Image (spheres, rainbow, N blue to C red):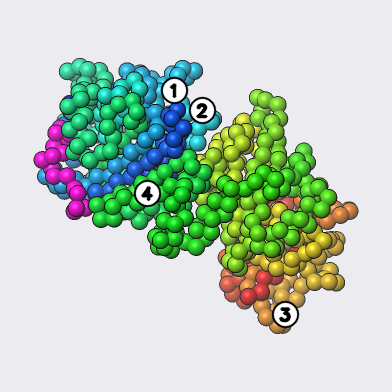
Amino acid sequence: MKWVFLKIPPGNTKEPISGAFFDSDDVSVRPGNALVREGIQNSLDAPDHSGKPVSVRIYLSGDALKVIKASDIERYMVGAWSHIRAEGNGLSPANTPKSENAPCNFLVFEDFNTTGLTGDQEQQYLRHGVEENNFYSFFRAEGQTDKDSTKKGSWGIGKNVFWRASCINTVFGVSVTQQHPEGFIMGKSIFKSHAVGKESDRKYQTGYFGNHTTNSTDGGMVMPIVDQECVSDFVETFELHRRYGYKNTGLSLIIPYYDKSINEKTVMQSVIEGYFYPILSGKLEVTVDTPKTGAVRLHKESLIDKVEKLGEEYATPTILAQIKLARWTQELPEKDRYFLNPPNKNCQWDPEMFSDGLLEKISEEHNSGRPVAIRVPMRIHQKSMRETDTHFDVYMRRVGEDSEKPTFIRDGLIIPGVRAPYMRGVLSLVVAEDRPIAEFLRMAENPSHMEWQHARLKDEYRGHKMSLEFVQRSVFQIIKLISQSEEVDKDLLADIFSIPKEGDKSSADSPQSVSPKVDSFNITRLQGGFSINRNPQAGGPHPSGLQVYVAYNTRRGNPIKKYTLEDFDVKSRPIQINSKELAILEKEGNCIRVQIQGEGFSLRVTGFDENRELYIMVNEVLQ
């Protein structure tokens, strides 16, 4: 067994690996967070048929207590060091071990009650329409995936977070499957193409640890090691909990020389923030294990107690409140859920979605401080299919005075970067688990599963932008509609817009043919837009911020209410926003929210249809 890097044929000058692998992004800035998200996601994608929760163990050796001596890891690095030292291989010299005799710190990521890396180990190429091959997808494929739409992730490059967590871009794997109950070992390194010795002797970017099927270094395949004595020694060396036998199927990954920014705290924070929902639902258990702290097990019954004991250093009060709200959703009787009517054909929020008296009931429940559960129906129109009925759930609770952004959960996976308005004193979860909406949102995700981007949906779905906005702005729209019900809570939307005083002519329900003018600022019409500046004649306290709503004027009704995304989106072209002495906190749909940072502030917004009249509503936020 040894490391093998195959030779690149003459004339092949293209860099085989995507440069994005080495770019600086969330994966390289926060490798621990990325590893936890991708690793647990992959484990949840591969449950066995036992019905037991997927169990994950994350072990960190530390830098001193349990590192492996160079003499003990030497047999697993045969043939590797000349490639690790090669110039131009993409590794950071500052992070690469200074000596082959240096001890090895290591990270272990193991899952249990999972299937392991199943599939044909001799498969060389991606084959569509055949049985899923997890072994090929993990160890042999580059930038490919064979996950279908029911899986929580679909990006083949996502697995690269394991290699990027290693200072030498190297990962070992031990897997037990029903096909291979005795277990097998495989290793893989991902570099840039590089030369060892002569420049003409260039090697492919990918190297494998295993049994080479030919003596030639420019051909053949590297196959997993199945010798039981070798597997047993490997398991013992890295102190794995994995053992032989079909009852112990799953995958153990070993990351040698792991990035020193990864520690027990960063891992625990990532587990709590990213996966509290499937833990509470009983689908997942996670143990974070270090020589210093011992094993800390997070499961359905212990999660809240453990998080409270760990304290704010590991989970903020907001995260703890989200966890408690999520636990409430798990125990919710169906009769206590409010059910809305479907939206109109343009997928817009409207009071008609609420049956008679329902808005008032939800408002009363919410204002009392009790949690509220709302089932929101909608239709998804995939271009190759008819419209499909689906739904998602909104859970919200009024808490404190701080501004919070909704937490979006798709198939148990928390998507932290979704763009949505912050809400003052409203803690909320938006949960999408019904298959059509979950598939729709999965396709909208970027490769790291951090945010939703409507452009990713345009080839597959009709009305994709409006449908995505419908989900993203759900909490904002529900709160907005509550505030407009008969019993208005005047503080509910204080961070989003002001509830006009009686007789205030700038009310959204009293549209004017010209822009409203208020004491603290002036609004000036421009060609294709408008500007807002401080009124030098203004007296009294100055506002700390402004909420600007804009729409095309209408002959009847409220222009703001009649706005649709088909008119424009202030965050997208052709709309252009320029500001001075302002911090733009939000630009979404027809709303721009800013914080004033100086008396000479100005906001200039252009790019609107010059043949249509603008209606502009500006509301102040006072300290």
| Image location of residue 256, percent across then percent down | 24, 42
**Three-letter code for the amino acid on which mark 3 is drawn:** Ala
Real-space Cα separation, disc 1 to disc 4, in angstroms = 32 Å
Q: Earlier in the sequence, mark 1 or mark 3?
A: 1
The residue identified by callout 1 is 132
The residue identified by callout 3 is 538
Residues at badges 2 and 3 in contact (C-beta under 8 Å)? Answer: no
Q: Is residue 313 magenta?
A: no
Real-space Cα separation, disc 2 to disc 4, in angstroms = 31 Å
- Say above or below: 413 vs 478: above
Q: Is residue 65 magenta?
A: yes
- Sort mark 4 into few (<14), some (14-19) or many (20+) by Cα contacts within 10 Å: some
Q: Residue at x 26, y 38 (%)?
A: 240
Please give the range of residues in magenta: 62-78
- Sort mark 1 into few (<14), some (14-19) or many (20+) by Cα contacts within 10 Å: some
Instruction: For mark 4, give the secondary structure.
Output: strand
Q: Residue at x 54, y 55 (%)?
A: 324
